[in-house]
Image (spheres, helix red, strand yellow):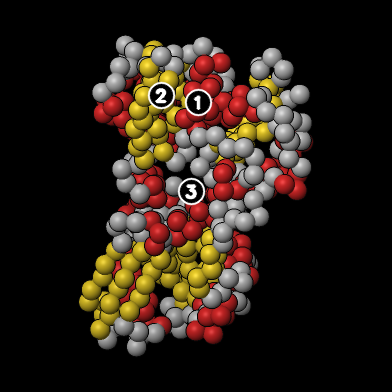
Amino acid sequence: MTSIGLEIGSVAVKMVTLDQDLHPKTIKYLRHEGNFTRTIATELRPYLEQGPVCITGPAAQMLLNFPYHPESTCLEAAMAQLVLKPDILLTLGGENFTLYAIQDGEIRDLYSSPLAARCSVYRKSDATHKLNKGECTPADICCSLIDDLAQKIVTLIDSSQWPADKILISGGLALNSPLLENLQRLLPQTEFMVIPESHTLEAYGAALKAAKQTKQLLPEEWFNSAVETRCELPPLNQGLSLLDFRVQAEKTRIIEENGRYILGIDAGSTTTKAVLLHAETGVVGAAVYLRTHGNPLAATQRCIIKLLHLIGEKTICLIQAAVTGSGRELVALHLDNSPFFNEILAHGRATAEEIPQVDTVFEIGGQDSKYIAFDQGIAVNYAMNDGCSAGTGSFIEESVQMDMGIPLGKIADNAFRGERKTWSPA
C-alpha cells in the first residue's frame, strides 16, 4: 500500500508518495495560488486515494482531517530515514526562513527570519524605478535579489551561533541553483547538502509517518467543514451609488480632422498612459493605458503606436508633448526634450481643470499612494505612504492576480460580485 505525505506551504502544496520499501515513488510541487482545496481535490486526488495520508504545514491542520504532524517531527523523520546528520537544517520557504539547530539527527533549537527587512512591494518599487530609469536590466534585478537572499541566510546562520560545517537545505528555494552558489561563495568552508527530496522534505517526513498507519479517509471526509469564516463588512456593490464614474462614461472619443493636439504621457511605475488632448477644447480625443513592464521607453512607443492606430487616416497637428510619472525624465529626453512634471503638479493641474471645487485627491498608484490637499485649485500639501504596501495597486495585484490566479482586468468585477467581505484559510 502507498503511503502519502502532504505539506501545505505559503506558496505551494507538496506531496510525496512512498512505495512499500519507503522509497519516494511520486514527488509533486504545485503552486496553489491561494486555493488549497482546488489543488488537493483536483490535481492530487488520484494520489490521495491510494493509501493512508499524513499532513503537515501551518494551514494543513485547519483545512484537512488527515492525521497531522508538526513540520519539525516530519523533518526529523526524514533525516533519520535518509541517515543524515547535518549541523543545521535550513528550510527556505516562500514566506520565511527557518534554521533548525541539529545534534545527532534531532532538532535542538530553531531560529526564524522573515524574507525581507522591508515590505516586499516596496522592494519591488526600488527595482521597478531602477528599470524605468534604465539603470539596470531584469537580469541585474534577479541577480541582486538572489544575492540579497543569500546575505540574509548567512546573517541567520551567524545569529544562531551554532556549528555550521554541514548544512542541509530544504524548501522550494533548494531548486534555485544561483542561490546555492551564492551561499557556497559566502560560506566556502561549509558543506551545503541538497538532495532530490530537499524541496519536499517535510512532505517526505509526513509520508514516513503515514507508513505507520492503515486508516484511510473517504474523499468526502478529507476537508474540515468546521473551518471558521468571519464576516465583517457589507459588500462593495452597496456603495456604488456613492461613486462618480464620469471618466469611464466617455467611451466614445473622436479625433478631429486637422485638429491641434497635445500629447500627454504618464510613464508610471507599473503602467504607462497616453492621451491626445485637444488644444482648444480640452477634450481627450484618444487615450491608451498599457503595462510598463520595467521599460518606460518601450511602453511609450507602444502607446504612441496605439494612438496612431486610433487616429487612423486623419491628419492632426501635434503642437506639444509633456510627461509625468516615475520614468518622466527618460521619456521626456527621448521625446525631443519635452517638458516634464512630477505627479503632484500633474494632478493639481488636471484637478483644477476638471473639478475646481475638489479639496482632496487620493491617488492609488501601482507602487505608492498619495494624498494631495488643494486650496482653490492649487496643491498646498501632500503626503505619500512609505511603510506598508497595502495602500497600493501592487498589493491588490500581487495578492489577487499572482496568488489566486485572477487576471488583473477581472479583479474589479470579482470584487463587485462578492456578496460579503469574508476571510477563510481555505
Q: Which mark is residue 107?
A: 2
In three-dimensional space, the C-alpha distance between marks 2 and 1, rounded to whole angstroms, equals: 9 Å
**Between disc 3 and disc 2, whose residue precedes?**
2
**Between disc 2 and disc 1, whose residue precedes?**
1
Q: Is residue 356 above or below residue 363?
A: below
Q: Is residue 29 visible?
A: no
SS of the residue under disc 2: strand
Q: Residue at x 75, y 48 (%)?
A: 220
As drawn, is 282 to the left or to the right of 241?
left
Q: Residue at x 36, y 40 (%)?
A: 114
The residue that disc 1 covers is: 75
Which residue type carries mark 3?
A: His
**Between disc 3 and disc 1, whose residue precedes?**
1
The residue that disc 3 covers is: 293
Neighbourhood count class around disc 2 (C-alpha, 10 Å): few under 14, some 14–19, many 20 upward: some
- Residue 387's x, y, as percent? 30, 56
Which residue type carries mark 2?
A: Ile
Q: As drawn, which residue projects farthest toward the left?
A: 380
- Residue 19's x, y, as percent? 71, 19
As drawn, is 4 to the left or to the right of 263?
right
In three-dimensional space, the C-alpha distance between marks 3 and 2, rounded to whole angstroms, equals: 44 Å
- Residue 316's x, y, as percent? 52, 71
Q: On the image, which quarter does residue 18 sit in?
A: top right
